[in-house]
Amino acid sequence: MNIATESSLEGATGAPVETDCVIIGAGPVGLFAVFELGLLDVKAHVVDILDKVGGQCSELYPEKPIYDIPGLPVVTGQQLTDQLMQQIEPFGATFHLGERIDELSREGERFRLVTDAGKVFLTKVVVIAAGGGSFTPKRPPLEGIEAYEGKSVFYSVRRMEDFRNRDVLIVGGGDSALDWTLNLHPIAKSITLLHRRDDFRAAPHSVEQMRRLVAEGKMRLMIGQVTELKGADGQLQHAWVKTKEGEETIPVDRMLPFFGLTMKLGPIADWGLNLHENLIPVDTEKFETNVPGVFAIGDINWYAGKLKLILSGFHEAALMAQKAGQYVYPGKKVLFQYTTSSSSLQKKLGVK
């Protein structure tokens, strides 16, 4: 699939990213917004705090069947995500995954957005499609863990090189824990995977690969839980792990806890937008917020009669795009086109 991905694993690029539109959220509604904007030749960059696209559909319910998508009698969350990615491929959106937009401000005629990784965007339009807000990692119940966060305890991998030749402890039993166990194994000094039980919620193939590495003595699997961290100046040195055999101290200088996610409105609450019970009020003509040029679509918005359905978000994305196109191309009349006659889409698809 030929979709550009500028993962936050590469770090901030330094120079601002200039674009027509920044979409905050890579769930189904954010992905469909790429399509509707693309029909109007509006170029989009998509930012999501998760390390993959699909939002809740991929992160929480990848195998859950969905029955109310028009034309698809039944589709899983992951299948819907995959098909949306295929649908938007002609429009060449760039994805910035594993990053959260922390700041939004005006800079002349454009908006300036800054991520928690320091990446800066300059854009004419902002579309908030963040579902119920941003996913926030759950913190392990360990005394003093805050002192290590961002220095030797991380809730996502931004740069793989930060883990090269390190003693890495990964805690968790889901896809993220298993994926990073396998991805970091080739470069880490040592990898220890710790889970409270010998049963994993990850893809069977990943679990099989992990067990093979354990059998070959190339990594360690421990069944238990962390009880204490030791180190100075934010740098981990050891972790105490309690297993059924007793308590053991292991060398650790990097720790990745994957304890799940919670939903919070996050930095959006400080952007000067009107709020209604932690949701963003919009009009129902163009789904614009009280700040001109900033739109909110999907579960993050509120209006009278709102239904939190994916198909409602698709409708909102279509109307939002018509107004967004006017900001991107001021003075030019935005013409609605059916996809069967859209010259832009046909050109992208190579249809003559």
Image (tube, grey):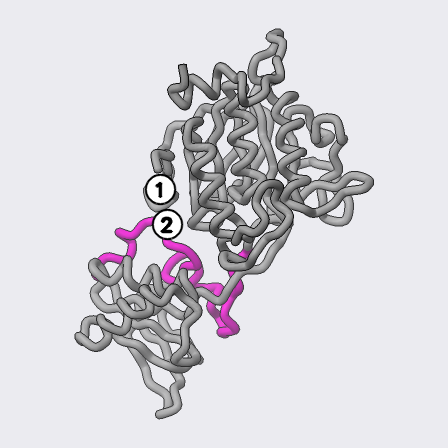
Residue located 36% across and 61% down the image: 152
Residue located 43% across and 39% down the image: 96
Name the disc covering residue 267, or none: none
Vertical placement of residue 130 versus 45, above or below: below
266 on left or right of 19: right
Q: Distance between the residues labelled 1 and 2?
A: 7 Å
Q: Earlier in the sequence, mark 1 or mark 2?
A: 1
Reading the image, the residue beneath label 2 is 158
- Residue 237 in the image: x percent, y percent? 31, 71
- Residue 319 in the image: x percent, y percent? 67, 27
Is-magenta flag for residue 172? no
Q: Looking at the image, do the residues carrying marks 1 and 2 touch, with CB atoms under 8 Å apart?
A: yes
Q: Is residue 233 visible?
A: no
Q: How crowded is mark 1: few (under 14 residues within 10 Å), some or many (20 or more)?
A: some
Q: Residue furthest left?
A: 216
Q: Which amino acid does label 1 sit on?
A: Gly
Q: What residue type is labelled 2?
A: Arg
Residue located 38% across and 64% down the image: 203
Q: What is the span of residues highlighted in magenta in the rendered image?
A: 136-165
158 on left or right of 329: left
Pick the residue in front: 87 or 216. 87
